[in-house]
Amino acid sequence: MTLLEIGDSLLLKGSPSTLFYRGDDTVYIVDPGHGKKRVKQIRKEIKGLDASRLISIITHYHSDHHSAISQGLRELLDKVMAPRLDAPAIRDPLIRVSLTFGMPLPSGDPLLPFHAPPIDVDEGLDPGTLLGSLEIVDLAGHTPGQVGILTPGGVLYAADSIFGPRVLDTYGVPYHFNPCRALKTLEWLRDSLGDRFEILVPSHGPLVRGGEAEALVESNLERVRGAGEALLDILSEPRSVGEAAYLLASRYSVSPSPERLMLIETAVKGYISCMRGTFEASAGTRGVMWRTSKS
Ligand SMILES: [Zn+2]
């Protein structure tokens, strides 16, 4: 078995990592991931778990967290569940890609990092509710409806509310659809660590506990706050979203590629949107120009 035992759960490491939780006769598979190799691994693990019911839980709409379902898992699953707010974008790749990248790229476009198939969601999940003994936790910000999964043994699968150090280094500006809301979620993680949960499992990065978990939450808080402050400074001159994204990426020494800049542009729009009163818009030959308000 390649599954790692953590508290009352099992983890299949990867990017994203997949959490397995056994409750009575049901095995829950949280964020099955993407790609043929992952499908093969999960099919093998399922055989060893001897479950009479299999439910897959998707934490949010990004394709890398759930494409495996359509790539060879669907027929094994009794049910697919996803946050009610994110479900339309999981069912429809056009909505998903438009929300993620700001334009409706077709599935298979070379600019898309992952295959983006449609996924049937059988039932919506609401934050604050219980699914068997699992608690569905509100981790909004990275996407409008992202949820985390909290086990009775204090393991929190935190999805993309928090990233490991390597992702922070590579992307510089963490991707959050609404960075202000993402900050609130990170503050909740900081305040709940050791009280509501002991083990924190980011989808992309090593699992952490204790002091290591505190440090990871702090570094994510600092980065999301810091990028907002850097943007205020960059927009002291009127600039387009694209220019602001390029300059923000340079501050974190991110090597610019169209794919990365498109994600950073979405994050920049997220900051402008959630700090709307802070920025003024004007029209120019380079499109809509944004500037930090003087007052
Ligand atoms: Zn994501």
Image (cartoon, grey):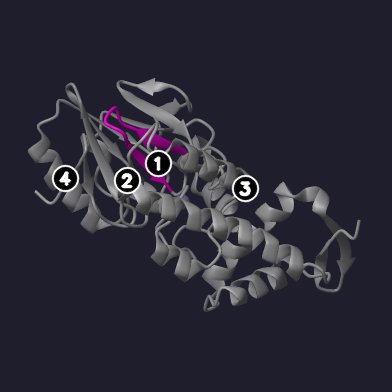
According to the image, label 1 marks what residue? 119
Q: Are marks 2 and 4 in contact (CB under 8 Å)?
A: no
Q: Nearer the N terminus, badge 2 or badge 3?
A: 2
Residue 164 location, x and y as percent? 39, 59
Which residues are the magenta region?
Answer: 147-159
Separation of marks 1 and 3 at Cα, in angstroms: 24 Å
Separation of marks 2 and 4 at Cα, in angstroms: 13 Å
Image side of residue 293 versus residue 25, left or right: right
User: Which amino acid type is marked by label 4?
Assistant: Arg
Label 1 or label 3, whichever lies nearer to me, is 3
User: Which amino acid type is marked by label 3?
Assistant: Asn
Residue 242 shows in this picture: yes
Label 4 or label 3, whichever lies nearer to me, is 3
User: Which amino acid type is marked by label 2?
Assistant: Ser
According to the image, label 4 marks what residue? 43
- Residue ID at (52%, 45%): 186
Task: Name which quarter of the figure residue 289 lies in.
Answer: bottom right
Q: Nearer the N terminus, badge 1 or badge 3?
A: 1
